[in-house]
Image (tube, rainbow, N blue to C red):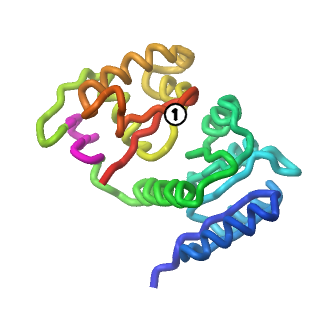
Amino acid sequence: MTQQPLVLVIDDEPQILRAVRTILLAKHFRVATASRGEEGLTLAAAQQPEVIILDLSLPDIDGIEVCSRLREWTQVPIIVLSVRDTERDKVAALDRGADDYLTKPFGIEELLARIRVALRHSARAKGSPKPIVTSGALEIDLADFQVRRNGVEVKLTATEFKLLAHLAAHAGRVLTHHAILTAVWGQEYADHVEYLRVYMRQLRKKLEDDPDHPQILTTEPGIGYRFVVEG
């Protein structure tokens, strides 16, 4: 019988640890907890969780440093859960390797939804899936460089496809402006956010039902973008 996913929660607030543990156990996850960064790093190495929920304000080392150290050896999904809600903190955590960011206080259903997305992303990364990403009526064939919407091929420029492919390959994750620009255009374009926005507008016009209210290529204000996988 397959074991339920193990979630490691690293947070120094006892009430948060208790609440998240209770929520996850009720949904049949296995749960490990740590109240300090070093303890969390040790547990992550020893127990190999499927998802890590991480607070940024820890008593021994900053949560952003924990992200960096985890990313030296593992690609386990990291969901930051913190009272620090500035764009600067969010971007720093995401650029250091976090997959997602929720601000305290948080909604239970939203947290569970983010965990499910993280698990799906992790499963795709571990397996050998077909290089096709779908979201609703949109289908992206990463191997054949083709995009179809409602079964009809959509013509994209080489740069548009490269941008879309990068977002789709990290479906469900929040990607910062800096990370996208560096991956798609190179380090010299890392600060050209308006350049990225122009291409995102072009992609939305070609791929979204309502480009002004995108459902697939969504904006994380002040941070970056997310490719949303819909059924």
Q: Which amino acid does label 1 sit on?
A: Glu
Look at 35% across and 21% down and name the residue there.
201
* Front residue of 223 and 158: 223
x, y percentage for residue 87? Answer: 65, 30
Look at 49% across and 23% down and name the residue there.
181
x, y percentage for residue 70? Answer: 67, 50
Q: Is residue 96 left or right of residue 172?
A: right
**49 vs 65: above or below:** below
**216 vs 119: above or below:** above
**Quadrant of the image containing the C terminus:** bottom left
Q: Is residue 92 visible?
A: yes
The quarter of the picture where residue 8 lies is: bottom right
Q: What stretch is highlighted in magenta?
A: 134-147
x, y percentage for residue 12? Answer: 82, 57
x, y percentage for residue 208? Answer: 28, 33
**Neighbour tally class for label 1: few under 14, some 14-19, many 20 plus, Cα within 10 Å:** some
* Front residue of 14 and 120: 14
Q: In this view, does 102 lie to the left or right of 34?
A: left
Residue 222 lies within the magenta run: no
**Quadrant of the image containing the N terminus:** bottom left
Q: Is residue 119 left or right of residue 48?
A: left
**96 vs 132: above or below:** above
**74 vs 209: above or below:** below
According to the picture, the residue beneath numbered tag 1 turns out to be 220
Residue 136 lies within the magenta run: yes
* Front residue of 90 and 187: 90
Look at 40% across and 40% down and name the residue there.
227
Q: What element carries label 1?
A: strand
Look at 54% across and 70% down and name the residue there.
5
Q: Is residue 38 visible?
A: no
Of all residues shown, which one is farthest toward the left? Answer: 152
Of all residues shown, which one is farthest toward the bottom? Answer: 1
